[in-house]
Image: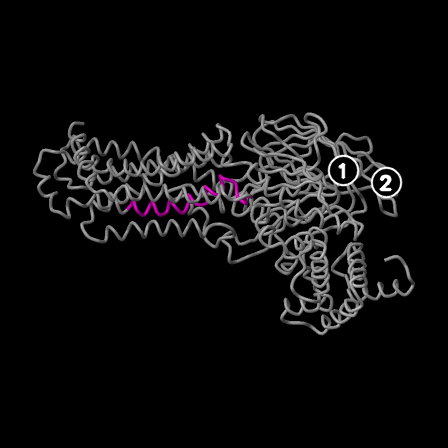
Amino acid sequence: MNGFSFIFKNEVSLLSRNKFLILPLVINVLCWGTIITFYEVEPFHFETRGELFYTNFQWILVVNLLLLGLFATYVGGKDSESEFESLVITYSVKNTHWLIGKWFVAQCYGACFTLITLFIQELWFLSGGMEVDEVVQNSFYIFFQMEGALFLIISIGFLLGSLIRSVISYMITPVVIGWMTYITVTITINSPINPRLKLILSQDAMYTVNPYSGIWGIGNILGNSLLHQAVVLLAGFFLLVVTLLIYRPRRSQRKEKFIVITMLVAVSIPAMLLGKQRYNQYDVAFKHYLETGQTYLMPLEEEESFYENRWDQTKSNFSMEQTDLVVVFPLKDTISVKSELVIRHNGEIAVNELELTLHHALSVTNFDNEIIDSFIQDGDSILVKTKEMIQPQQLIQLKLNYEGNIKQYRNDALVEQSFSSEDGIYLPKEAGWYPLIGKRKLAISSPHSHIYSNFDLRNGRMVETIPTAFTVHIDQPYGIPITLTIPEVEKGIYKGISYYGLSLIGGNFKEEVFEGIRLIGHSDLIPGARNEVTMSIDGWRSIEEWLGVPVVPEVIYIMDFMHAELTRQSPSREFLVWDGFVLKGLLERETTRAFYTTSSLVGDYLFNTNNDLRNDSRIVISLMDWEFQKHFGTASNFESYSEVYYESNLAISPREEKLIHMIGKYEQKGEVEFSALVKSVYLQYEEMEDKTGFNLVNAIEVFEQLEIEGQDL
């Protein structure tokens, strides 16, 4: 050890003469200081501190990897470049002491970057009100992420510098870092590249955009990340041992070679075992995702319906009047539920069977009811046959118990759609975790040759025609706060009537009631959500009074982008899901308030297969958006609706010309007449079950007839 200590001290003494080595550390501090300052001076935030930190951390880490990789290459090769190495090899210093001493100096310099980043993160998170245990969790994550990545890249640079005595050694390191950055950036959502390639990166990147998932933080990925980084650290040691083995082997004594070979074996075996374990972890999840895509794969000839979620809706002659659930979380990612359902038969003829929808991973263990003859669970569908005929308007009561694994994945298994653990719970309605009436499409996948998985997967449209009365009993699982889209009436009991349904979350969230609306999300984002409600509430109430339909939401979840995006297929008036991008867009572009309100009321543009009616729904949506702008006080600079439509649509069909002309006549009559037309068109559109058959010409003619007859519009 004396030889190693001497080399280490000597190298530190030589490098400390270069005062510029402190400069990268100072630049790191200044970068983080600037990022934090700009965040803290803003009155409203659109990212949590964690999301902002990790977004910038990923890019700062790339720069640090490049810098330290080149520095390690310099440390490994500087003596051979100055020919000092030729003198050193004549001394009685072992290769291991000589190389490990220099390598350890480079690693210590890299550790300075890690410690500075760790200190800044802890100080900022604690000052921002984050709980101590979550700060500790994030500190573990950032330490192993950064130190593991730097450890490996320094070992790579040192290997290149020690063995390649030319400028090529400095060129290889940037290529390696550039390739890893390309993989990280490219494999996000629906990538054409095998997502398993992310497993060989210097830092764990098995996520889409950001490892920090709002109210769930980094808890769900921490364990896998630590395993990944353990493999990375062992890989760094492996490269060091390889350097020791092949660097001037003639100078190594037999005993020294034996020790090095022993170290090589000692490092290789656990690296391969842990690497295989980490690979299997993701491989199981990815195969689960592939099975999901195949389960919901639609025929190629029906591909167009993938982009029109209204076609997901299936008709049922039954309605769910009441749902009572007792939910237990016996194991990680597992639920056990006792349910009691009250169902009404709305059809005109008596029948003896009905269908329910429940995710296929949840198995019905008991159907306790005297009226049930039999039931068949096939995929997501449960076909129930009764002993006697169910008469029109008759209410029937069903009791069923079910249990199973609720872990579901999206986006190449880089996003967990539903899960339950001590780090967080998420059971969205789209996961099919409680019985839904009718045969529903929980998800739809479409063949796609430009995606590695060969399919694109989205959630199905989960929109109900009538509200359901819910009562849910939940024991506090894992000791973490939980909430639902219906309010908690007493400890562990949630009760309410909802058109949307149930979405259950558990994690580090804050809940408050503002303007009669429940705001639920990360504490960093609640002030921004509160501000947006303040800006929108008058417009919502004005539209509500005008149309005579509920518009003001009852509950708003503020979530991370990926999980918010997964709820977009099921628009709802009473339940909204915002993310940071939505909040930022609403604040910076006030006209988007009308856009999001239109989406919740009308839905998306219909890809109607009837060419004559193809653009009718688009005109309805643009009409509502134009009218809503006035209610929000954000009307555009255009003087008329016709002007807006012609400006935003380059190709106008003859049918559109006719419709815009018909609408324009009412706009010329005045604001009252035009507003009455828009209201009539919307109400007719809303009453239709099958929106694909909506005919705007007929709707305008109905309005004109009502106007002639003088009926209340």
Q: Amino acid at mark 1?
A: Ile
Q: Position of residue 313 (x, y in %)?
A: 72, 51
Q: Position of residue 189 (x, y in %)?
A: 51, 51
Task: Give the residue number, with chain letter if any, for mark 2.
Answer: 390
Q: Is 160 left or right of 118, judged from the image as shown?
A: left
- Quadrant for the N terminus, please: top left
Q: Position of residue 233 (x, y in %)?
A: 34, 36
The part of the image, by quadrant, that contains residue 299 is: bottom right
Q: Secondary structure at mark 1?
A: strand
Q: Is 672 left or right of 61, judged from the image as shown?
A: right
Q: Residue furthest right?
A: 709
Mark 2 or mark 1: which comes first in sequence?
Answer: 2
Tell me if residue 226 comes above or below residue 355 in the rendering. above
Tell me if residue 569 comes above or below residue 366 in the rendering. below
| Mark 2 → mark 1, Cα distance in angstroms | 25 Å
- Answer whether residue 474 is magenta in the image: no
- Answer whether residue 57 is magenta in the image: yes
> Which residues make up the magenta segment?
44-69
The part of the image, by quadrant, that contains residue 310 is: bottom right
- Residue drawn at x 88%, y 57% as measured from the top left: 712
Circle 1: is it few (<14), some (14-19), or many (20+) Cα within 10 Å? some
Q: Amino acid at mark 2?
A: Ile
Prevailing SS of the magenta stretch: helix
- Residue drawn at x 88%, y 48% as measured from the top left: 348
Circle 2: is it few (<14), some (14-19), or many (20+) Cα within 10 Å? many
Task: Give the residue number, with chain letter if any, for mark 1.
Answer: 497
- Total marks placed: 2
